[in-house]
Amino acid sequence: MESHEQEAAVCSNCGSPKLEWARVRSAFWHQDTLVVVEDIPALVCDKCQERHYDDQTVVALDLMRGEGFPAEGATGELRVPVFAFGHRARPKVES
């Protein structure tokens, strides 16, 4: 059922009927560590890019979280830059 449009489904975000199966990547915080999970099956809206996961996928992701994402189960590692928003924040002005 992968890589073809889902006829009966409608995007819950924008209402578009054009959803397509894809394998996606998503990031999760586990305690103070950011982890990335790849190859997640999802219905992706062609219009707004919203991702829709079936119950089996959600349960599998919850089980991965419950296992604590042990390092020995990782298939790779990413190095990402970190930036500070700092002075770019505007103070909230109350009227």
Image: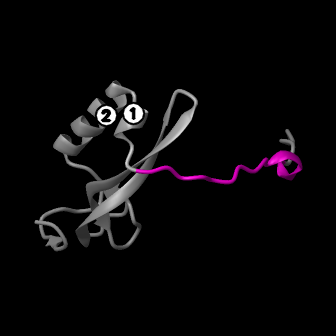
Q: In screen coordinates, is 65 left or right of 8?
A: right
Residue that badge 2 annotates: 64
Q: Quadrant of residue 58?
A: top left
Callout 2–callout 1 Cβ contact below 8 Å: yes
Q: Is residue 5 magenta?
A: no
User: In front: 31, or 18?
Assistant: 31
Assess disc 1: are there few (<14), some (14-19) or many (≥20) residues with their C-alpha within 10 Å of its C-alpha: some
Q: Which residues are magenta?
A: 76-89
Kind of residue at disc 1: Phe
Q: Split into 4 quadrants, where in the image is the N terminus?
A: bottom left
Q: CA distance from mark 2 to mark 1?
A: 6 Å
Q: In screen coordinates, is 39 left or right of 25?
A: left
The residue under the point 16% across, 74% down is 4
> Which of disc 1 and disc 2 is earlier in sequence?
2
Residue that badge 1 annotates: 69
Give the colour scheme shown: one colour
Q: Is residue 78 magenta?
A: yes
Kind of residue at disc 2: Met
Q: Position of residue 77 (x, y in %)?
A: 49, 49
Q: Position of residue 65 (x, y in %)?
A: 36, 31
Q: Tag 1, which secondary structure? A: loop
